[in-house]
Structures are given as C-alpha cells and as structure tokens.
Image (cartoon, rainbow, N blue to C red):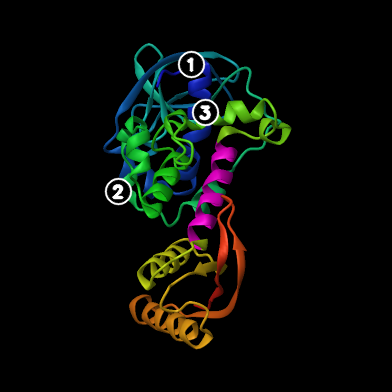
Amino acid sequence: MGLRIVGGLMAAVIAASSARVCSANHKLQRIYAAEFTVTESKAVLYSNDKTKVYSQPDISSGVVTTVAPDLPIEVTGVTSNGWFRINLNGTYYVPADGLVSRNADSSKSVVVSSDIINLTKGTFSFFMNPELGDFDKNDIEDMDENTYIKYLDSFLMGYALLEGCILQDSGKSLKEVYESEAKVDKNVANMTMQAYLISYRNNYLSDSLIGPFRNDRELKLALNRAIRYNITKFWAVYRNSNVASDESKIKKAIENVADEMKAEQGVTFSYSVKYGDYKTSDGTAGKGWIVEFNKKD
C-alpha cells in the first residue's frame, strides 16, 4: 500500500502509541527496541515541547539533544516499535509524540496511552512484528476471531502503521473505509483514524462473544476471550440441534461448559438462559438460547 507522505506519517503519529505507552512502561520499550525494523518514508514534520532525540529507538539509549518547538525535522522512516527515524546531521530517533504535522487537527477525538494499555492487555506479544503491514485481504479472511483481534490490537499498540490495517468484514484498508465514512458521517470525521479502529475493534470483539455458537468448543472459545479481555458481562446465542428448545438440556449443557471453564481457567461464570428470537449486529436473525454470562472471578 502506498503511503501518502504526511498523511501516512500522521497515521504513524497516532498508531505509534507504543512510544507514549512505553513512557508509562519503560520495560516494554526496552524489550521491543532491541529488535526493530524501519519502514522507509520521507516527510517533514515539526518539533513540539516533547521533542527529544535519541541515538536508538529506545529510551535507555540516552538523550542526544532536545529540539525547540515548531522546527521542521526531516523524517526518513518509522520503526516497527513506534519511533520516527530522522536526519539531523546524522541518523537519530524521536518518539512518536515528539513530532507532529503542522496541519494536525488537535480538536479531533484522541486516545491516551493508558487507554491503549487497558485495551490491548490480552494481546500476545507474538504479534509484535513488522510484517503486519504486509498482510493482504486473503491473509485476513483466513484469520480466526482470536487471531484477528490480536492483529487489530497490534496496530493499536504501534507495531505497524495504521494504514496497513485491513478490515476483515470488507477486505478494504482501514484508511480507505475511514476516509470514505468521514465524508458522510460527521461523527467519524471528528475522530482520529485510531479512535475509529478502536470502535471497530470493540464492535468486532463484542460480536465475537455473541455467536451463535453450535457446540461447547465454540462457546468455550468465547468464554476464554472474555477472560483474556476482562469482559465481566455479556450475552451469547447457543444453537444446538441436540438441545433444541429443551430447557433442561440447555441448562445441563451450559452448566457443563461453566464447570469446565472453572476447572481449566479457575474462573467462575454464572449464567441465565432464555429461549427466543435474536438478531446480531450483522443482521443474522433466528431463534435460539440467549445466555447471559457474568464472570465472577
């Protein structure tokens, strides 16, 4: 995907929240900075009151110098761990929040680093890799729900440029969908692309807990997902031909699943069941058991 110079790097400013995240979590930064790659990209951004220059994209490498606000800085690339590579009479690095576009719209909704930390705490570090931006539509379509949530979280954590993110339901790039919707929806226009991705990710996560699920294994995957992301209350649809509308069978089936989750994960789920009509956000409708889960510990 071609990068539009300033637009691409502004996406990096937003996406590379790992630099801000790591200001609150220095250990995370040191672990990731040891192995990084650089996406080549050229632009001129501007310094602000946070512009500190480092010899490596790692806060432990030490500050080389500081730069006064509102000065043009030549950017030559973006690192996979969320820093700008710059040319300043030599090659140096600046954290993502240390450079801005002169045209940056500060009135738009933004996401602070603490939100990113809380949002992505269930994501496995395996997805910290620069190849995320090289995935294509077919790669994304083949991802299961757990993998795709981690894929989305990796962009939010700054492990790849936001513009490289592909939305699974449309197969289109995040940037393409975001810009298209922003033209007709003022609510989208008033949020950053990162905030839009967070909304998409949260809706996707919520939908992944609803189902409908047709066997115990699928339902347990949803419960594991709820544990991983600390979701304490949600509803799911269970449709199984062996259970049908038999209340005694559904209670026994859900009881078995809850007992297995407690034995395997040490987490207790309470639940209530009701047979009736349901409709998911993608328009899927039908009759089935609507199960409300509450995570107790």
Q: Which mark, residue 175? A: 3
Whether residue 228 is situated above or below residue 125 in the rendered picture: below
Amino acid type at circle 2 is: Phe
Q: Give, as a single range, the part of the protein colored magenta.
A: 194-209
Q: Between label 2 and label 3, give the one nearer the viewer.
A: 3
State the residue in front, 224 or 286. Answer: 286
**Figure quadrant of the N terminus:** top left
Question: For residue 74, which quarter of the picture?
Answer: top left
Residue 49 in view of the camera? no
Residue 166: within the magenta? no
Label 3 residue SS: helix
Position of residue 190 measured from the top left corner of the image (x, y, whole percent): 69, 32
Q: Amino acid at mark 1?
A: Arg
Q: Which mark is residue 126?
A: 2
Alpha carbon separation for disc pair 2 and 1: 29 Å
Residue at numbered disc 1? 4
Residue 100, image x, y percentages: 56, 23
Residue drawn 63% across the image and 23% down it: 104
The structure residue drawn at horizontal position 40% and vertical position 83%, both measured from the top left corner, is: 256
What's the magenta bit mostly, secondary-structure-wise?
A: helix
Calculate the distance from the C-alpha at mark 2 to the C-alpha at mark 3. Answer: 25 Å
What kind of residue is marked 3?
A: Lys
